[in-house]
Image: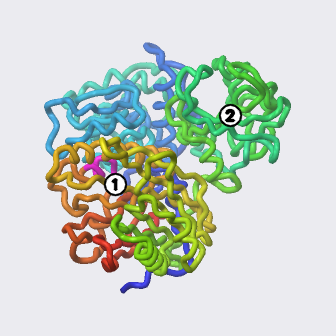
């Protein structure tokens, strides 16, 4: 039996880094035809083109495209190509795909999962997704193509690999990348793109098509710095009402309310540039934004009674920017605080600010890369099924034997009404457990972790499906390590008999949709999860279109059985490799893995040593 303990724990830079940032880091290397230097300080986002007015959502997409180009040191001509392309392909709108077109290939079935992700419009053209209408799966995963920052990076990567692209016209370069059925369609978008990039009308369409030298400057953006809580210690209470609904809000609440007396100092959560908006009446006289760069992390501050900063001012983390007030749509003194990882507008990319603050206060929200050779090890996770027919003594002995292997995290299925806190409390070592059981239902799955190494900063359970006899839930936890990274873990027990019983297959499909939504939501919040589960359908075969392999592929996940050296044989006495882990391969890597023996259960425990891509 392999020994599961690997030494002193570290995962590296993979959890607090958003998918967009990871993509930028990954593609800055390689043999790229840059064709110029990053000399773009004068590039601005104009208020509007000569022939159209852009709404806030469109302007956010334009800003994201420009920011992605700057981060990659793309010269202005390349950004001009990207803007013209996106204007033609989508009108700067993020398109989901409903999968109702008759032109999908067999490998593009399931594209409708894109509807679960933030989008501005819905299309049905082949496998086209996002702002650039890139074809899934050849351009990337659905979450990647639906993220304007990542989609733009992928476009630039393809453009920079075209030999001599910078000597082409904008239309020629765009067509070389996109392979459109209408190669001249980009030409009439070039003047508007030129104006968006420079703030000026082009002297002529020919000038816009051929220009290479645009305004000069540099490509710097503001360093985020350590995150500060936006109010002084002990002065406030967090109502933790992100996503809530009520008479005070038109839609779901997009921030959290920090209740504090009027006149309490409001502090900048990060370094950044101050943006003062006066067009959001709900916030009062002002809505203050602190931006770390176009298309990058931005925090919002609403209802303030007074300001101590000015438009365009540079501030540092913890610096006072104003005072708590009760202006606008407010029933009392409080600070409305929002977090937008990609600098999006209202309703676009906000994440739960309470969880974000809990995870990031006191450190940079992007963890630096760690050298994996420096006597550091990945995290070890185990998933196991303790069969429901086991008595208390047998189940206790089984769980104690699993914990004796010293995993960092143990995901248990079929826990039913067992008192895991008592069982775990009597085991050797120091363990904590999340076993949700409100009301009459039971989550079926629990998450146990090494309490000497981890603390839970947030946890919950989402309904997988509602059946006639019982409901099945999905358990999750964000575990903060003493090494200052966050390990998002999801545990679940998929329905049985789905292969032979059509009713249970319907349950399986319902729960599949539920876990797809949860995993996408966690990943979008900056917490790409690792899922441990009893899947009850093979994890190393894609022969069933509704099964986990294809369903996970649709949202950019893979399983441990499809990578690395897996243990031989089935994991269930009923046959098949149905127990194991799922994760995003661009975020994590399997360092080692294996299985333990049945020991009284009808399932073999499966474990993985998993590290980041940093």
Q: Residue shown at 43%/26% (left/top)?
A: 193
Question: Which callout, 2 or 1, points to the residue nearer the camera?
Answer: 2
Q: Earlier in the sequence, mark 2 or mark 1?
A: 2
Pointer 1 residue: 557
Q: Determine crowd level at label 2: few under 14, some 14-19, many 20+ residues with C-alpha closer than 10 A.
A: many
Q: Examine the rendering and report whether any part of residue 133 can be seen.
A: yes
**What range of the chain is rendered magenta?**
551-556
Q: Residue at x 47, y 77 (%)?
A: 400
Residue in the image at 30% along x and 65% along y:
579
Q: Is residue 313 positioned above or below 159 on the image?
A: above
Q: Which mark is residue 257?
A: 2
As drawn, the residue found furthest toward the right would be: 263
User: In the image, is 459 to the left or to the right of 103?
Assistant: right
Residue 466 among those drawn in magenta: no
Could you tell me which secondary element the residue under label 1 belongs to? loop
Say above or below: 567 vs 334.
below
Of residues 32 and 231, which is closer to you in this image? 231
Q: In front: 448, or 71?
A: 448
Q: Is residue 6 toward the left or the right of residue 123 in the image?
A: right
Colour setup of the view: rainbow
């Amino acid at each position: 039996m392999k020994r599961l303990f690997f030494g002193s724990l570290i995962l590296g830079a993979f959890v607090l880094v958003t998918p967009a940032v990871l993509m930028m880091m990954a593609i800055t290397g390689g043999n790229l035809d840059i064709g110029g230097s990053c000399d773009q300080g004068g590039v601005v986002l104009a208020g509007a083109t000569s022939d159209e007015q852009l709404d806030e959502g469109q302007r956010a997409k334009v800003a994201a495209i420009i920011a992605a180009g700057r981060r990659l040191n793309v010269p202005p001509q390349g950004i001009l190509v990207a803007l013209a392309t996106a204007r033609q392909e989508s009108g700067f709108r993020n398109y989901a795909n409903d999968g109702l077109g008759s032109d999908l290939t067999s490998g593009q079935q399931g594209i409708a999962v894109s509807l679960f992700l933030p989008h501005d419009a819905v299309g049905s053209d082949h496998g086209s997704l996002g702002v650039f209408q890139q074809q899934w799966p050849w351009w990337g995963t659905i979450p990647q193509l639906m993220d304007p920052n990542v989609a733009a990076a992928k476009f630039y990567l393809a453009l920079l690999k075209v030999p001599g692209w910078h000597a082409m016209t904008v239309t020629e370069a765009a067509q070389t990348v996109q392979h459109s059925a209408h190669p001249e369609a980009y030409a009439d978008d070039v003047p508007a793109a030129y104006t968006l990039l420079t703030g000026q009308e082009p002297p002529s369409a020919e000038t816009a098509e051929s220009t290479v030298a645009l305004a000069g400057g540099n490509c710097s953006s503001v360093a985020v710095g350590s995150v500060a809580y936006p109010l002084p210690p002990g002065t406030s209470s967090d109502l933790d009402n992100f996503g809530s609904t009520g008479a005070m809000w038109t839609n779901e609440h997009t921030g959290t309310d920090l209740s504090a007396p009027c006149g309490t100092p409001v502090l900048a959560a990060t370094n950044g540039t101050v943006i003062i908006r006066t067009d959001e009446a709900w916030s009062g006289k002002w809505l203050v934004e602190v931006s770390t760069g176009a298309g990058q992390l931005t925090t919002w501050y609403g209802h303030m009674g007074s300001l101590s900063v000015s438009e365009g001012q540079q501030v540092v983390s913890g610096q006072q920017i104003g005072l708590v007030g009760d202006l606008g749509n407010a029933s009392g003194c409080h600070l409305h605080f929002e977090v937008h990882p990609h600098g999006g507008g209202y309703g676009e990319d906000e994440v739960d600010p309470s969880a974000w603050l809990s995870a990031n206060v006191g450190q940079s929200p992007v963890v630096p890369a760690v050298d994996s050779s420096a006597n550091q090890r990945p995290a070890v996770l185990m998933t196991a099924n303790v069969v429901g027919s086991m008595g208390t003594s047998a189940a206790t002995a089984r769980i104690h034997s699993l914990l004796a292997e010293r995993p960092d995290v143990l995901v248990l299925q079929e826990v039913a009404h067992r008192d895991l806190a008592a069982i775990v409390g009597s085991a050797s070592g120091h363990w904590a457990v999340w076993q949700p059981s409100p009301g009459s239902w039971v989550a079926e799955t629990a998450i146990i972790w090494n309490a000497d190494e981890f603390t839970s900063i947030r946890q919950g359970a989402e309904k997988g499906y509602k059946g006639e006899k019982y409901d099945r839930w999905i358990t999750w936890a964000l575990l903060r390590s003493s090494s200052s990274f966050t390990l998002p873990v999801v545990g679940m027990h998929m329905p049985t008999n789905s292969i032979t019983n059509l009713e249970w297959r319907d349950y399986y499909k319902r729960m599949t949709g539920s876990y797809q939504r949860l995993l996408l939501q966690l990943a979008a919040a900056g917490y790409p999860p690792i899922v441990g589960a009893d899947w009850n359908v093979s994890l190393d075969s894609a022969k069933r279109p509704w099964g986990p392999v294809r369903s996970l592929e649709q949202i950019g996940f893979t399983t441990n059985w499809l990578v690395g050296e897996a243990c031989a044989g089935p994991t269930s006495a009923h046959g098949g490799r149905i127990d194991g882990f799922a994760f995003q391969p661009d975020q994590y890597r399997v360092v080692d893995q294996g299985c333990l023996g049945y020991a009284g259960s009808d399932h073999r425990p499966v474990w993985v040593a998993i590290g980041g891509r940093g």
